[in-house]
Image (cartoon, rainbow, N blue to C red):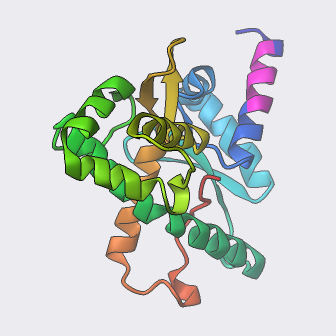
């Protein structure tokens, strides 16, 4: 990799991280592979530390993201708490959708980064199971997935498109009906585990540790 290309990737990567993206192999393969090099990972982390951030990865190394460095700063704690509060609002609909997807796919396990979802398979499962159709209807009427579509296919398309917009899925191919789960799911699961391990999140001492939540 020549110096110009290396510099371009570095600059693009910093922009993604500061925008709150979770950089993974699915959504940004070149940038993800760049970070897999320990030297490049160190360079990115060193740069982020100079501007008050640090480079973090999910436990399974499927995604990288930027976090605040100094959590004792009052303004940083305020930003983290605001981001966390906003993200919490999305947790319930995301969990409900995960349950729907697991039931439809009959896998018995939550989505993992790199997993493939086919809209046609999901639609077939929803159409053949009244309880799944009812859950899709509820998801489509409130919160994160609220849309004005009518009919199960349009509602499912709207939900899947919303997941793409939020960075949890990436459409694959020209058909627009095949989707790949991104590293943002791993980040979500870790945040849910944090909540599960901490019963009280209202006091200043309970702000999420070293966490800058993806936008």
- Magenta residue span: 5-12
* Residue 33 lies in quadrant: top right
At which x and y percent is residue 39? 61, 29
Q: Quadrant of the N terminus?
A: top right
Left or right, 123 with reference to 44: left
At which x and y percent is residue 101? 30, 42
* Residue 195 lies in quadrant: bottom left
At which x and y percent is residue 23? 58, 36
Instruction: Tell me what residue is drawn at x 75 percent, y 19 percent.
Output: 6
Q: Main secondary structure of the magenta part?
A: helix
Left or right, 31 with reference to 57: right
Q: Nearer the viewer, residue 53 or 42?
A: 53
Evaluate whether residue 74 shows in this view: yes
* Residue 138 lies in quadrant: bottom left
Instruction: Tell me what residue is drawn at x 40 percent, y 68 percent.
Output: 194
Direction front: furthest residue: 150
Q: Is residue 147 above or below residue 15?
A: below
Q: Is residue 183 magenta?
A: no
Q: Is residue 50 above or below residue 26?
A: below
Evaluate whether residue 25 shows in this view: no
At which x and y percent is residue 183? 46, 39
Direction top: furthest residue: 2
Instruction: Tell me what residue is drawn at x 76 percent, y 30 percent.
Output: 12
Q: Nearer the viewer, residue 3 or 164?
A: 164
């Amino acid at each position: 990799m020549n110096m110009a290309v290396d510099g371009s990737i570095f600059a693009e990567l910093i922009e993604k991280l500061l925008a709150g993206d979770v950089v993974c192999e699915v959504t940004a393969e070149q940038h993800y592979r760049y970070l897999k090099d320990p030297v490049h990972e160190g360079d990115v982390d060193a740069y982020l530390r100079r501007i008050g951030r640090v480079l973090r990865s999910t436990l399974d190394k499927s995604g990288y993201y930027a976090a605040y460095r100094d959590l004792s700063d009052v303004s940083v704690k305020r930003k983290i708490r605001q981001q966390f509060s906003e993200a919490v609002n999305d947790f319930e609909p995301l969990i409900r959708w995960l349950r729907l997807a697991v039931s439809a796919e009959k896998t018995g396990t939550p989505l993992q980064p790199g997993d493939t979802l086919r809209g046609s398979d999901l639609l077939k499962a929803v159409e053949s199971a009244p309880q799944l159709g009812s859950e899709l209807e509820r998801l489509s009427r409130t919160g994160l997935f609220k849309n004005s579509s009518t009919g199960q296919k349009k509602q499912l398309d709207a939900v899947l498109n919303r997941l793409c917009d939020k960075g949890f899925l990436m459409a694959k191919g020209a058909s627009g009906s095949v989707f790949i789960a991104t590293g943002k799911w791993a980040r979500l699961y870790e945040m849910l585990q944090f909540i599960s391990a901490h019963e009280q999140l209202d006091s200043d001492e309970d702000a999420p540790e070293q966490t800058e939540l993806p936008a």
